[in-house]
Image (cartoon, helix red, strand yellow):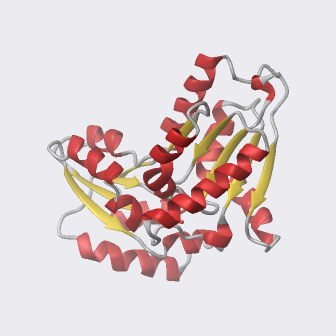
Amino acid sequence: MMCDKPIGVMDSGMGGISVLKELARIMPNEDFIFYGDSANAPYGSRTTEEIYQLTEAVVEKLLKKDVKAVVIACNTASSAAGARLREKYPKLPIVAIEPALKPAVISCPGGRVLVLATEATLREKKFARLMEEWKDRAEIVKLPLPGLPEFVERGELDSPALRAFLQKYFDTVNDRPADAVVLGCTHYPFVRKVITQLLGPQVKAFDGAEGTARQLRRRLHRRGWLSHKSEPGSILWLNSSPDEKMIELSKKLFETP
Ligand code: DGL
């Protein structure tokens, strides 16, 4: 039965765990398979074709595990591969995260919205379309942060080095304080506290996890594919890195409040 099958969730590494948390919170009876492609992370500085090939390979692995749906819990992979993968697998529900620009702009009309994401996410057509839709309602400032996912991949969620790294980038856009910040890469919610502390108490932070989780729930509900179980679901952790510590760290990140 379709409803008994697990949901596949993928990311370039461990960032997607921030989305998995929301998925498991709103669908606690579902079984999940989380695949982190940490051996190939970061995706954000790669070419579009490379990101597509890597994402497709992960989706193939999830399909071999007989998943009923796939969540691309990586903004970078969504931008570079989401549309092509939907064409390739027309019967598979594929939900792809995108930067939460809409709620951020709506929260501060006419204000300044800082969009933090990878270089690839910010250069792709998917983001250009989103930006086109909202650009007249706020001052939208794009800021790629190459190097930030690596901090999360080693479990470094707050440190003087991380603060110095972020401050260097924030100094390049400090001519006016930001009213809202979009955490447009799924690794970034793990360092939300540091980001908001550095940007100031006025800033509101937004990420796409909740919208993505709700969208998947809606799509599964429409097909009658939501789990009917009453007991809590399970999570199977997979990672392309041979380092066994990655699974341990994944579970730790999942438990991070
Ligand atoms: N977690 C990914 C995202 O949401 C990107 C991190 C990377 O560069 O691999 O965009």
Residue at image location 58% in from the left, 17% down from the top: 222
Q: Residue at x 72, y 47 (%)?
A: 62
Q: Is residue 188 above or below residue 165?
A: above
x 60%, y 54%: residue = 56
Q: Position of residue 63 (x, y in %)?
A: 72, 44
Question: x%, y% of residue 110?
Answer: 16, 45
Q: Is 97 on the left-hand or right-hand side of 143?
A: right
Q: Work out which quarter of the rendered image holds the N terminus and state it.
A: top right
Q: Is residue 257 visible?
A: no
Splitting the image into 4 quarters, where does residue 202 fall? bottom left
Q: Is residue 183 visible?
A: yes
Describe residue 79's horizontal placement relative to residue 74 as left or right: left
Relative height, residue 193 to residue 168 (above, below): above
Relative horizontal placement of residue 237, taking residue 123 as reference (left or right): right
Depth check: 205 or 87 in front? Answer: 87
Q: Position of residue 7 (x, y in %)?
A: 70, 38
The structure residue drawn at horizontal position 34% and vertical position 64%, both measured from the top left corner, is 199
Q: Position of residue 74 (x, y in %)?
A: 53, 54
- Give the quadrant of residue 134: top left
Q: Examine the rendered structure and indicate whether residue 159 appears above or below residue 200.
A: below
Residue situated furthest front in the rendering? 88
